[in-house]
Amino acid sequence: MSDTVFFSTNHSLSLGDIAEAAGISLPAGADPATMFTGAAPLESAGRRDLAYMDNARYGDALAATRAGACLISPRFAARVPAETIALVTRDPYRAYAGLLARMHPEAVRPAALFGTEGVAPGAHVHPQARLEEGVQVDPGAVIGPGAEIGSGTIIGANAAIGPNVRIGRDCSIGAGTTLIHALVGNRVIVHPGARIGQDGFGFAMGVSHLKVPQIGRVVIQDDVEIGANTTIDRGASRDTVIGEGTKIDNLVQIAHNVVVGRHCVIVSGVGISGSTTLEDYVVLGGQVGVVGHLRIGKGSQIAGSSNVNRDVPPGSRWGGTPAKPVRAWFRELTTLARLAERSGRNETGEAAD
């Protein structure tokens, strides 16, 4: 449920607007002029709220909901209460997300913390930096010489933007972020505390370990989102690249020379070692570890907590430690469980199978 202190409710939508935006046909008798002032979970929604449901676990909540309208998949449509308008769609969650963005556009992209326009008092912008009109810089932020920042971009409080960094238009750089040796596209969101462009971890090993200068960059393409406290190291001799539309969760480590393709999803706790390539549309579950110099093929999915130590073919679903195709992984788990069960029976004196 949205809190009006943080998220305003002045972006109401009519039922007709909702149906048009979501590409949904209204049921017979529904009044398209009915106004909806918010969105809420099934269990707390009221008559002017929009809700959604696409999981059988929430059947009881659906039966008891007081929501004015509910986005619902076809298989659950018959279970919507008579007082609630059923808005049937194949993908309720996606439709809900789009409508929520219309109701609360301020929640889509982090805003300037202090609501200032232009460069706030207490920020420092080097005279040789170039800011297009409409850039907002919060107090405490530092922008170095030669940096270029596009219009509509927000630089959060205490963020540090290094010399010659390029940031595109309509970006949001979170409070306390450091961004050096980087080229950033348009509509990129970097959440607070992220560290981008620092040294990769490179040493020539020996009696004393010799630091290898890291002379690459980080290149972040359009529409990327990077979570809080995530770190992305710059390349050693070539660039670390994050492809268009990729979404990275909090607390992820991406090492030097890594190339992440377009529209990948990387969940919290992932660590990707140096010089690994993720092709387009790869999904890494939480706490996945990836060994260096590997290639994970297009569209592959790796289950959470897995460890990948060899190349993954395109379109694969792998899991486990070391990671392997999910069918082999499940067989392995089933076999181990049966062996453990038999061992337990033997220890208690029962006959084994």
Image: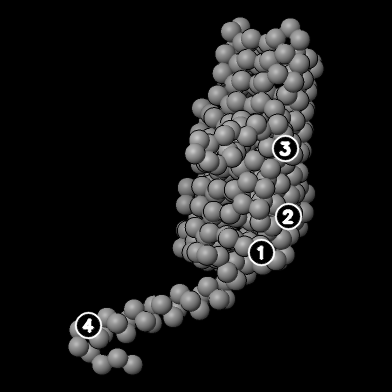
Q: Which residue is nearer to you in this view: 96 or 300?
A: 300
Q: CA distance from mark 2 to mark 3?
A: 20 Å
Task: Between label 3 and label 4, give the one nearer the viewer.
Answer: 3
Quadrant including the C terminus: bottom left
Which element type, helix, strand or loop, lies under badge 2?
loop
Q: Residue at x 59, y 66 (%)?
A: 318
* Amino acid at circle 3: Ser
Residue 165 in the image: state x and y as whole percent.
73, 24
| Marks 1 and 4, the one that precedes in the sequence | 1
Q: Where does label 2 land, which residue?
A: 279
Residue 216 found in image quarter: top right
Q: Which residue is nearer to you in this view: 112 or 148?
A: 148
Q: CA distance from mark 3 to mark 4?
A: 58 Å
Which element type, helix, strand or loop, lies under badge 3?
loop
Which residue is outermost to the left? Answer: 349
Task: Between label 2 and label 3, give the one nearer the viewer.
Answer: 3
Q: Is residue 353 above or below residue 316?
A: below
Q: CA distance from mark 1 to mark 3?
A: 25 Å
Q: Where does label 1 land, which residue?
A: 312
Q: Which mark is on residue 237?
A: 3
Q: Which mark is on residue 347?
A: 4
| Marks 2 and 3, the one that precedes in the sequence | 3
Which element type, helix, strand or loop, lies under badge 1?
loop
Residue 172 in the image: state x and y as whole percent.
67, 28
- Disc 2: CA contacts within 10 A as few (<14), some (14-19) or many (>=20): many
* Amino acid at circle 1: Val
Q: Residue at x 55, y 65 (%)?
A: 323
- Disc 4: CA contacts within 10 A as few (<14), some (14-19) or many (>=20): few
Q: CA distance from mark 1 to mark 2?
A: 10 Å
Asked if labels 4 and 2 touch by Cβ distance under 8 angstroms, the answer is no
Task: Between label 1 and label 3, give the one nearer the viewer.
Answer: 3
